[in-house]
């Protein structure tokens, strides 16, 4: 490199530094075509280069700059959670519908359905030592009916994590006893089903958390066999004594109510235009949540993630930057925790629309986006792997997962052959509190979750504008029931 070139370079560098100084002092306003900079000395100039300000960029900027996710989550994080059919849940339904209207979404409506809902008032677990003592923090599991007023007394039997082989090994010894199992190794409902089949009097699951019980659905429909959750610390003490061969008896008392409720799925749209306007992209999340804590992470976080994407997409449309080719329909389901009741009711109520649903994107505790998982059609991973490549700023795994699992509201659609996917991610240290009293606003990584809104908005926009649907509707018979 010659002297002249060096001098030129040095000048360019000085100019660049000067330029940076100016920009630091400046107020910047963005338009679609360029960047107008007003310096503090009131002189104005326009940066001459133009960049491709695509709707994707505008969407990400909108979510990151003006996102209301954290505020919406604060409003929906309610002490006592949002159990379907309770006052809290009805208030949450109205809140989401109001926000949708304020954000300019259309066809905002509450679609009622009926389900059996459940809530416990009082749970007492007494270990019948001499003298008897109560296990602090014991809680009833979902859909367990009240015991007789004097409670139910039975001996305990310890069955590790309650796997099929544990029940097999115990054989006839299970009948008439209350099965004690540790959390992990599958759904508590499956363990309870094994316990009922083996003639057990009930089941107690020991939480992984030392000082908190973790609840959740236990029986599919309300049943009399009591199911309880207890914190890890007393649980481990009881396990040690049982493993040492001690005979232990407990008394279980549950006061609970199950009733026929009419919750609502909340629906709102951004209508499409053009030849594919009657095709639908469903963006869904369950708004109901357990009564412990504030149901913030599960699934306040997913609910506000799709609400934020709705807000940003609607803003882009309103500003005239973009018009979706397909109709975007956002649905907040109730009844998920008690057995996917809201999404099942929705599929039943809209049979004529299933053919027109090109994708269901369901978010249940998304966190900071890390991977995509598709459900149903086997060509879906390939399709989303391509979309992922355009989201270079996010740490989304190259490999797109595929599952036929039933754990959330995508399942009733998947069973009908409707293509579905989810964004899953890193939930941070608060993840351990899900389904426990620790599920509060403070346990949610709102910053990471906001990233999921941006990624979701980009995915939705791409899907809305595809010339062809990515995969056809699948054969419903390919998905057997759980
Ligand atoms: Zn959930």
Image (tube, grey):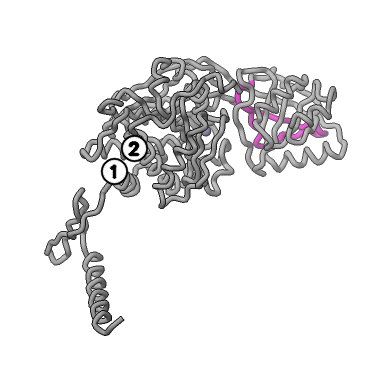
Q: Is residue 86 visible?
A: no
35 w.r.t. 132: above or below? below
Tag of residue 55: 1
Between residues 317 and 176, which one lies in front from this camera angle?
A: 317
Question: Could you tell me which residue is drawn at 21 percent across and 38 percent down?
Answer: 320
The local secondary structure at tag 2 comes to helix
Tag of residue 98: none
Residue 143 inside the magenta-drawn segment: yes
**Of the image marks 2 and 1, the number of the one nearer the N terminus:** 1
In this picture, which residue range is highlighted in magenta?
121-144
Q: Is residue 378 visible?
A: yes
Position of residue 15 measured from the top left corner of the image (x, y, whole percent): 22, 73
Question: Could you tell me which residue is drawn at 38 percent across and 29 percent down?
Answer: 469
Mark 2–mark 1 CB contact (< 8 Å):
yes
408 w.r.t. 27: above or below? above
Say whether residue 364 is left or right of residue 179: left
Position of residue 372 measured from the top left corner of the image (x, y, whole percent): 49, 40
Q: How many marks?
A: 2
The local secondary structure at tag 1 comes to helix
Position of residue 326 measured from the top left corner of the image (x, y, whole percent): 32, 29
Instruction: Assess disc 1: are there few (<14), some (14-19) or many (≥20) residues with their C-alpha within 10 Å of its C-alpha.
Output: some
- The quarter of the rendered structure image containing the C terminus is top right
Say whether residue 137 is left or right of residue 288: right
Between residues 114 and 284, which one lies in front from this camera angle?
A: 284
455 w.r.t. 201: above or below? below
């Amino acid at each position: 490199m010659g002297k002249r070139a060096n001098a030129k370079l040095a000048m360019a560098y000085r100019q660049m530094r000067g330029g940076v100084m100016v920009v630091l002092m400046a107020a910047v306003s963005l338009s679609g075509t360029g960047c107008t900079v007003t310096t503090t000395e009131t002189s104005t100039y326009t940066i001459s280069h133009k960049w491709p300000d695509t709707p994707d960029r505008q969407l990400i900027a909108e979510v990151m700059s003006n996102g209301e996710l954290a505020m919406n989550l604060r409003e929906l994080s309610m002490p006592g959670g949002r159990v379907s059919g309770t006052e809290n849940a009805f208030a949450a339904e109205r809140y989401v519908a109001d926000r949708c209207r304020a954000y300019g979404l259309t066809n905002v409506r509450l679609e009622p359905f009926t389900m059996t809902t459940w809530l416990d008032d009082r749970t007492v677990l007494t270990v019948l030592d001499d003298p008897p003592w109560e296990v602090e923090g014991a809680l009833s599991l979902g859909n367990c009916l009240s015991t007789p007023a004097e409670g139910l007394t039975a001996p305990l039997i310890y069955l590790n994590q309650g796997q099929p082989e544990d029940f097999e090994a115990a054989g006839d010894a299970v009948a008439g006893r209350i099965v004690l199992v540790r959390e992990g190794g599958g759904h508590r409902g499956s363990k309870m089903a094994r316990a009922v089949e083996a003639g057990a009097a009930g089941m107690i699951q020991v939480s992984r958390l030392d000082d908190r019980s973790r609840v959740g659905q236990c029986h599919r429909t309300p049943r009399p066999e009591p199911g309880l959750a207890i914190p890890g610390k007393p649980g481990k003490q009881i396990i040690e004594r049982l493993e040492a061969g001690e005979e232990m008896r407990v008394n279980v008392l549950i006061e609970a109510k199950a009733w026929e409720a009419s919750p609502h799925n909340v629906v709102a749209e951004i209508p499409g235009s053009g030849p594919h306007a009657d095709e639908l992209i469903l963006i869904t999340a369950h708004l109901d949540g357990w009564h412990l804590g504030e149901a913030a992470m599960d699934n306040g976080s997913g609910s506000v993630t799709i609400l934020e994407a709705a807000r940003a997409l609607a803003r882009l449309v309103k500003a005239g930057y973009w018009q979706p080719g397909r109709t975007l329909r956002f649905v907040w389901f109730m009844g998920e925790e008690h057995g996917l009741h809201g999404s099942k009711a929705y599929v039943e109520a809209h049979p004529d629309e299933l053919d027109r649903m090109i994708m269901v994107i369901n978010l249940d505790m998304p966190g900071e986006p890390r991977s995509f998982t598709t459900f149903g059609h086997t060509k879906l991973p390939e399709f989303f792997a391509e979309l992922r490549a355009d989201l270079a700023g996010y740490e989304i795994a190259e490999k797109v997962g595929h599952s036929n699992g039933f754990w959330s509201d995508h399942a009733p659609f998947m069973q009908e052959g409707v293509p579905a996917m989810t964004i899953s991610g890193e939930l941070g240290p608060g993840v351990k509190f899900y389904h426990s009293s620790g599920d509060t606003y403070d346990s949610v990584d709102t910053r990471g979750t906001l990233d999921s809104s941006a990624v979701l908005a980009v995915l939705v926009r791409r899907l809305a504008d595809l010339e062809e649907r990515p995969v056809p509707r699948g054969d419903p018979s390919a998905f057997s029931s759980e």
